[in-house]
Image (tube, grey):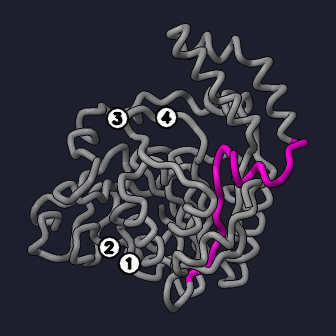
Amino acid sequence: MSDIDFPNLLACPAAHRAPVVGSGKRWGCSDANCEYAMEAGGFPVFRGIPVLIDFAGNTLCRREAYIDAEGGSDVYMKRRPESVKKRLQRLTGGTSSVTLANCRRFLDEIGKIAPVPRILVIGSGERGQGTDMLWENDGVQRVGIDIYPSHTTHVVADAHDLPFREQSFDGVWIQAVLEHVAEPQRVVAEIERVLKPDGIVYAETPFMQQVHEGAYDFQRFSVTGHRFLFRRFDALAMGGNKGPGVVLAWAIRYFLWGLLRSRKAATAISYPLLVVLRMLDRFMDPRALWDGPSGTYFLGRKKDGPPIPQRDLPALYQGFQR
């Protein structure tokens, strides 16, 4: 954390947004009247990571989760080891060429903004698929937040109330997160707040996927619905990510899971079909990525001026049903 300018970056997640002060195991709001002021005990620190969450506000997060977890990382859900999760992801879709290309473009775009651009990674508890170049690029500064502590999480935070000052970042990367938040519009408004003028956002969110992360799965978006979520941004690129083959692979695995009552058995038995279906996606008509994608993506630039109007949405559609 020493290479990140936290004294000039952090802000209290409570409504007044006063600066956060402290270091190491002591962090608190600089407003003496705030319930998170140093004098009032400040913010919790969990596994050496400051927990900058307004627990008194409208949040799914619970203060006791960061006290009773006994130093573990399974704060809300039992999480599989990252190596196991990556193997399962390869079975049901592998690394997306779309994500790889979009990650490269995201880095190119933010590189035009600053010599050493600062990126906020929302959902940094583990590296997302296709993001190695984001994490291994020495020419950018990364700040990671998640509700789960990890070696890639600098601050434990709720994306509904980002604990950062306005216009702090050149880019924001949010991959496979918006389905897990209760109010995605509020999260996008926070992204806009912390981005600098002309800052870049990249988002990937599921569309045709079954529930994952159990009780903490709330949203799905079509390509145009996803674009409208970011209506205050200029679109640089948008579309579907992973086709109907991957969608069918998910459905088969969940069908077998329900039938056999065993996630492990469902994954093992469905493996040959998943491999074939994943390969068949390569031959799909591009329009299928509008009507039946596994997920959607949006790459955009923060803009001044009004949001795009609803009347413009139908013209964006490029699927089979035009």
Q: Residue at x 53, y 71 (%)?
A: 230
Q: Where is the C terminus found, in terms of image quarters?
A: bottom right
User: Residue at the location (54% across, 10% down)?
Assistant: 259
Residues at discs 4 and 1 in contact (Cβ within 8 Å): no
Query: Residues under labels 1 and 2: Cα distance?
Result: 5 Å
Q: What kind of residue is marked 4?
A: Val
Look at the image and tell me whether residue 99 can be seen.
Answer: no
User: Residue 11, which numbered label?
Assistant: 2
- Which residue is identified by label 3? 71
What's the residue type where badge 2 is placed? Ala
- The answer to the question of whether label 4 and label 2 lie on touching residues, with beta carbons closer than 8 A, is no
Q: Nearer the viewer, mark 4 or mark 2?
A: 4
- Lateral position of residue 155 relative to residue 170, left or right: left
**Which residue type does callout 3 highlight?**
Gly
* Mark 4 to mark 3 CA distance (whole Å): 27 Å
Q: Secondary structure at mark 3?
A: loop
Location of residue 303 in the rendering, given as x and y in whole percent from the top left corner: 56, 86
> Which residues make up the magenta segment?
282-302
Query: Which amino acid, mark 1?
Result: Arg
